[in-house]
């Protein structure tokens, strides 16, 4: 395929692929928010001495980390309707991504919380702070600084994981790329273009990660 043909192909494909990339970005951000909302309470539940909360949280993390994300999507979208629970493709995809990300984020945060020296807890108790006050005002700020790199890596991986939602007919970058290939019969340049778009999106989130790390480090240094 010559250069003029490639230019014509990309000129035709660009609007469609960029639209798909927009959907990918929206799904990734929505799943990030869902994962954070699930990850924080799960991490806290796992460090509490109450088995009534710690055991279900641990089971959730084990199941989500121990099974493939693709299988989780199939269970939610294709399996649950058999018991009367139905989701639209978009809802099922974002739910699966959020549940999966929440499990990994909770482990990052749990490890960061447990890395804070126990002396921080005892010092806070000696000042009259309770458990929840110590966790919120003393431990979590320190834990977040430690957890940001690993949590950010999990969130950035969501950009790539969104490619899996094409299997449940969600419109996003990978599905639009496949549709273009079906009409143009040019898989190599189009798949390479899709890879480049995923890379650019990931680079954008990596930039945000570095800024967040610098901000937290400056705040800690004060």
Image: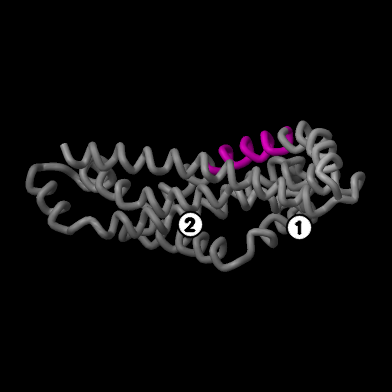
Indicate the position of residue 135 as horizontal and vertical percent values. 25, 46
User: Is residue 84 in view?
Assistant: no
**Considering depth in this image, is 213 or 65 the residue closer to the camera?**
213
Does 141 appear in magenta? no
Q: Which residues are magenta?
A: 19-32
Q: Dividing the picture into quarters, in which one does residue 10 lie?
A: top right
Indicate the position of residue 83 as horizontal and vertical percent values. 76, 54
Q: Which residue is mark 1?
A: 79
Res. 12 mark: none
Res. 104 mark: 2
Q: How many marks?
A: 2
| Number of other residues with Cα within 10 Å of mark 1, as a class: few under 14, some 14 to 19, many 20 or more | some
**Considering depth in this image, is 160 or 128 the residue closer to the camera?**
160
User: Is residue 170 in view?
Assistant: yes
Indicate the position of residue 194 as horizontal and vertical percent values. 71, 46
Q: Quadrant of the C terminus?
A: top left
Image point (23%, 38%), residue name = 218
Does 25 appear in magenta? yes
SS at circle 1: helix
Q: CA distance from mark 1 to mark 2?
A: 23 Å
Q: Dividing the picture into quarters, in which one does residue 68 lie?
A: bottom right
**Considering depth in this image, is 210 or 85 the residue closer to the camera?**
210
SS at circle 2: helix
Q: Give the vertical position of 75 relative to 35 (above or below).
A: below
| Number of other residues with Cα within 10 Å of mark 2, as a class: few under 14, some 14 to 19, many 20 or more | many
């Amino acid at each position: 395929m010559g250069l003029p043909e490639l230019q014509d192909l990309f000129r035709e494909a660009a609007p469609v692929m960029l639209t798909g990339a927009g959907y990918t970005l929206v799904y990734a951000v929505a799943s990030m928010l869902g994962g954070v909302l699930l990850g924080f309470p799960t991490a806290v539940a796992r460090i509490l001495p109450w088995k009534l909360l710690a055991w279900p949280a641990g089971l959730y993390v084990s199941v989500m980390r121990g099974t493939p994300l693709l299988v989780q999507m199939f269970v939610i979208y294709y399996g649950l309707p058999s018991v009367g629970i139905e989701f639209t493709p978009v809802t099922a995809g974002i739910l699966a991504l959020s549940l999966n990300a929440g499990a990994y984020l909770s482990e990052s945060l749990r490890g960061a919380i447990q890395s804070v020296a126990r002396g921080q807890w005892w010092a806070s108790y000696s000042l009259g702070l309770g458990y929840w006050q110590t966790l919120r005002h003393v431990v979590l700020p320190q834990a977040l600084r430690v957890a940001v790199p690993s949590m950010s890596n999990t969130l950035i991986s969501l950009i790539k994981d969104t490619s899996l939602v094409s299997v449940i007919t969600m419109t996003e970058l990978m599905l639009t790329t496949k549709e273009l290939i079906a009409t143009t019969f040019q898989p190599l340049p189009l798949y390479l273009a899709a890879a480049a778009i995923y890379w650019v999106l990931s680079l954008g989130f990596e930039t945000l990660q570095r800024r967040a790390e610098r901000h937290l480090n400056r705040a800690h240094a004060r």
